[in-house]
Amino acid sequence: MARHRPTLGLVRQFACVTIFSPDEVIGRDALDLVFLLRDFGDNVPSMKQNNYTFGWHLVAFLDVLGQRERFRQLKVPTTPAEVLTVNEVLMQTAHFVNDLRDQFKEEFLDFDRRLSMKRPVVESLMPKFVGFSDSFVISIGLWDAKDDFTFFAKVYSTLSAASSLMLTSLGKAHALRGGIDVDLGCEIADGEVYGTALEKAYLLECRAAEYPRILIGGGLWKYLADGLVEFESRKTPEADKICNVIRKSKEFMAIDSDGRRILDYMGAFMKTISLPGAAENLILPAYKFVVAESDAWIKKGNVKLAGRYAVLRRYFEERLHIWGLKPDDVV
């Protein structure tokens, strides 16, 4: 069945889809939309019933690049030197990915703590996480927030955390690529989103992003634009606060040199919310890594990767001044 939240119309639409056996008859009122999924055939026992929550989800698909290549160099160690080599590679791959996931969660917990100092927090902003290999998926149901402010605070916190994660990853000599979008989906297991929302975020990462960056999908942009129109029409203090969160979320975004909308993790807004010392502790190490990778691929004659890191290097150098840095700071 599908219902529409009156506060945001289609923006907050959600549906609860129930799988029934073909022989069952379910009565619903005129406002309900019932999906009878008959294509499961004999795989669904006649009395089995499964409930799925189907609605709008924000999904971020993030991939740590270069991990598989490092693993391919490994073999079962037979000498102390080989043991050390394996340990080093595992620390730079499996351990790093685990640490990155933990940091992402900590970013949300920190945002929860800071938000609770300003207003009562009706629910945690922590998203659902699913990791596999060197990728991980972050998903947030956008139809079940306890109030409208929390609804958009979840988007803001995801963009903020992803920005910090991008800089941290590059600063530790690991390239990150991803996509973030909003579309329909459902949870088929605890934390595991399934549907168009996941597909769009994944395709942004693997087919569209190309170089280390995080693309913003059209669904997320429209979602924020529609929300802003909705709440600007309301003349209440709470609506003003919600509009402020939406505007700040949009400030995390910029148009890249190829016309695609990206997460602007080095932009002016990110600078305003960063801790003191971020230029030296985050930006500079990340820039040094980008320069080193750019130079290394040029030296190796890899035109494809040299070109991609040239674009990333240009992104950094166009924004270094925001952080009080300049290209000459890389020694």
Image (tube, grey):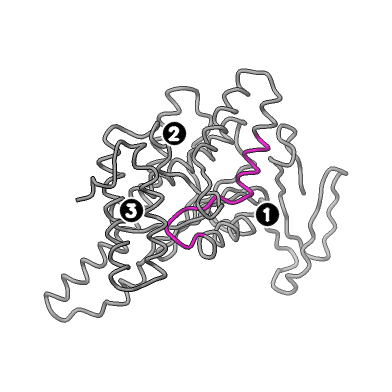
First of labels 1, 2 by sequence position: 1
Q: Position of residue 319 (x, y in %)?
A: 38, 42
Q: As drawn, is 58 to the left or to the right of 177?
A: right
Observer-side mark, 1 or 2, equals 2
- Between the residue at mark 2 and the residue at mark 3, the CA separation in whole angstroms equals 25 Å
From which residue to which does the magenta span run? 209-227
Query: Relative to 126, is 295 above or below?
Result: below
Of 184 and 31, the residue lying toward us:
184
First of labels 2, 3 by sequence position: 2
> Mark 1 — residue?
51
Determine the secondary structure under disc 2. helix
> Mark 3 — residue?
170
Q: As drawn, is 226 to the left or to the right of 296?
A: right
- Between the residue at mark 1 and the residue at mark 2, the CA separation in whole angstroms equals 30 Å
Q: Residues within 10 Å of mark 1 (few under 14, many from 20)?
A: few
Q: Which mark is residue 112?
A: 2
Determine the secondary structure under disc 1. strand
Determine the secondary structure under disc 3. helix
